[in-house]
Amino acid sequence: MGNNNKSKSTVDRRNEILKRLQEHGKVKVENLSKSFSVSSVTIRNDLEFLEEKGIIHRIYGGALLREVVSHDKELDEKQKLHAEEKKRIGQAAADMIVDGESIVLDSGTTTLAIAESIKDKHDLTVMTNAINIAVELAGLENITVMLTGGTLRKKSYSLVGPEAESAIQKYYFDKFFLAVDGFDMNHVLTTPNPLEARLNRLMIDQSQEVIVVTDSSKFGRRSFSVICDVSEIDTVITDKGIGESYRNETKNKNVNVIIV
């Protein structure tokens, strides 16, 4: 009887931990220990159990909710998420771009934020597979805009397919700015669409420097299609919400981490 009560208490506590994670996205061991009047060791055991189930990702002193990004969101829906963080990331990325360079901007709301921040650059060549990014930069005398061509994906305004791949392979670029839907140290960098992932891999091959731009909500997520291993990128620009474990693990793979 006592064992059953203890088991029920454990199940209830873990369910409550999950509920708090779903509400806040993050929990701390210290706070949970006080809230449930149990030891920090007990809470860590709870978090270990939930991590083994693939539900959460443990970070130093707590845990983050692990979301599996298996669906492809509408661009308008994505644009509303983490807007301020994306604006800061976009500006930080723009600061890395030097006049006279040739760059590639992947499709995505964070890369759109880069486009919005580079309009004062000079003698810049920008290739993109995103219709909305091309429109954002259209008409600027100081920036040459090139579109890959290809088949239009309606949800993301991005161009993919053989024509896009052929266009990318004709050029070399100084920098490639890559937006991802999932950044997982175990499952590498991912995106929902296989054709998008294939095009991204070619963009990596044709670029001297690869810079991932992503808000911190993408860490601990994984999506359907693998783009590349984390070790294949040079820099990550993200916001202050990145977990310490992801920050350290990324640096351990010789990747520069810029937090804005």
Image (cartoon, rainbow, N blue to C red):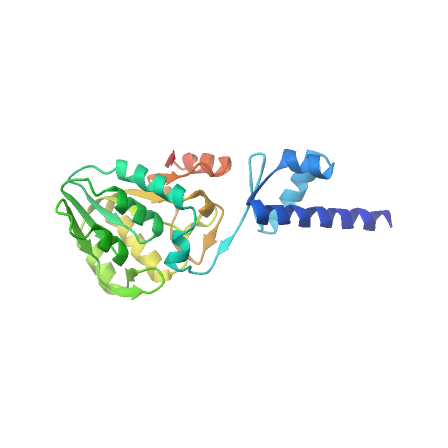
With 194 as the anchor, is 100 left or right in this view? left
Which residue corresponds to the image point at 27% horizontal and 39% vertical from the top-left? Answer: 94
Q: Quadrant of residue 91?
A: top left
Residue 158 visible from this viewpoint: yes
With 71 as the anchor, is 53 left or right in this view? right
Which image quarter is the C terminus in? top left
Which residue corresponds to the image point at 15% horizontal and 51% vertical from the top-left? Answer: 139
Q: In this orientation, which residue lies closer to the viewer: 128 or 176?
A: 128
Residue 233 visible from this viewpoint: no
With 129 as the anchor, is 59 left or right in this view? right
So how many labels did they put on this image? 0
Which residue corresponds to the image point at 68% horizontal and 34% vertical from the top-left? Answer: 40
Q: In this orientation, which residue lies closer to the viewer: 105 or 73?
A: 73
Q: Where residue 26 sits: x, y (%)?
A: 56, 42
Q: Quadrant of residue 162?
A: bottom left
With 51 as the anchor, is 83 left or right in this view? left
Q: Where residue 118 sits: x, y (%)?
A: 23, 42
Q: Where residue 75 sits: x, y (%)?
A: 37, 57
Q: Where residue 66 sits: x, y (%)?
A: 53, 49
Which residue corresponds to the image point at 63% horizontal and 49% vertical from the top-left? Answer: 19
Q: In this orientation, which residue lies closer to the viewer: 200 or 151?
A: 151
